[in-house]
Image (cartoon, grey):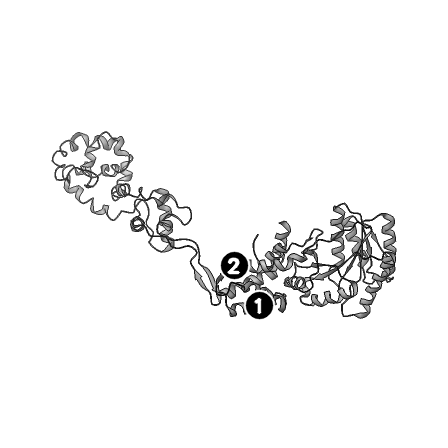
Amino acid sequence: MAFFKKLKDRLFKSSSKIEDGLDAIIEDGGTQDASDPPAEIDPKAEALATTLEGVTASEAQQAVDHLIASGAATEVPADDTAKPEPEEQPTPEPDTVPVPKPATVPEPKPDTVPTPKPATVPAPEPERVPDPKPDTIPVPKPTTPPGPRPAPAPPVEVPEPPQEVPPATPTEAPVPSGDPAPAPTPVEIPLDTLPKAEAPTKTGLLGRLLGRGDGKGVTRRALDDDMLEQLEELLITADMGVDTALRVTANLAEGRMGKRLSTQEIKELLAQEIARIMEPVARPLPLYSKTPQVVLVVGVNGSGKTTTIGKLASQFRAAGKKVVIAAGDTFRAAAVEQLQVWGDRAGVPVLTAPEGSDPASLAFDAMGQAQADGADLLMIDTAGRLQNRADLMEELSKIVRVIRKKDPSAPHNTLLVLDATTGQNALSQVATFQKLADVSGLVMTKLDGTAKGGVLVALADKFGLPIHAIGVGEQIDDLAPFDPEDFAAALTGIER
């Protein structure tokens, strides 16, 4: 999984290109479908959307934030929601108590009635008298109470409570002149009975009550001939080649014509088709009982042969094998030194020869040395050569002939190292090297660069040669066995 993440992160040039291309194809002529059907609107939820007074401290904040964010309502503070209504109530207060105005006006008992204070105060009755709320008090309107209550209120009962409550009431009196009404109203609103108010998990309180989901619509497009053409062009630009692109799209369309597909669904279908093509060729490097097993590594200039040999030698040594490396690239300057550095990293001995010497002679001597040392594997590096240079390719054929004089069955493996950035030119390389060196397997390197990666699918589809490993970097652990499903997912941009 760690290597897949590395492959996915470093193969972004190809995966992002395919992903962006698929998005463009689906959006071109596609329509958006709602991800989830809208829920039915609860009548109580509609009432809640218009009157927010009954919401508790936490629920009110969530409800107000959601309404303001969606534009369904303007901001309404939770504590001052009914301020405009209480302005009409202070007017009846002076009418009901004309004589004890000095005592009743400062007296914020109506304010304390909604708050928990009336419960603690021993005389809540006088406080109800000035309260113009017929809803909460079953007693008739101020016409009846002012008769019996005015007498006891002004002389003794009125002054005593102000002495006990003045410190708290004067502060509340000026501001809560409009507060007395809002406090009782939220308590009386039957919001406790709302069943959905307890589940603001996904879209918030009002979002769930009003059936508003957060899920965005998914764009889909019907699979038709035009869409298939666009998919073919996209795969061709990803270096898959014309024949492979046509085969992949034909398999994808089988039984799905006319169906509406999303980008994610097409990604999964493409990944399945690519993995199906790559599955037969995903095989590790075979190991034989005969020792030393000779592994000849070939490829064009700069394909990554030297670094691949160092990484493979490190893995084989970690598996308990005794490995010897022969530096057969005697033409390139500093090639031997580079291989020696990799040999030191892997803890593997490197057999060398003077610069400019015959590489076939070095390969012959290395086989004898490996037999004497009891090595399990002998990995022979060769000079890079272009597949269109007949003279250089003849030198490679000479190395193979000389090795077979020592062991007729050698080389037991011939690995062709391919640079993924070469694109469709890799097909020509495989065809030429297979004729002259009898290539037995492939290693694809530099998938972390500007490579599009699709050429590996074309190689598997056309030649069917085993793909032993892929490289995604220059570190010694940046070479891993080829996994077709991981590669297909990384190529198409699927998260795993």
Front-most of 331 and 260? 260
Question: For numbered disc 1, what is the local secondary structure?
Answer: helix
Q: Earlier in the sequence, mark 2 or mark 1?
A: 1
Task: In the rendered structure, find residue 87 and report the number of the disc placed on it.
Answer: none
The answer to which quarter of the image holds residue 304 is: bottom right
Q: Which residue is mark 2?
A: 265
**Neighbours of disc 1 within 10 Å: few (<14), some (14-19), many (20+):** many
Question: Mark 2 and mark 1: span between their CA atoms?
Answer: 17 Å
**Neighbours of disc 2 within 10 Å: few (<14), some (14-19), many (20+):** few
Q: Residue furthest front?
A: 255
The answer to which quarter of the image holds residue 251 is: bottom right
Front-most of 174 and 344? 344
Relative height, residue 77 to residue 337 (above, below): above
Front-most of 89 and 424? 424
What number of labels is visible?
2
Relative height, residue 23 to residue 197 (above, below): below
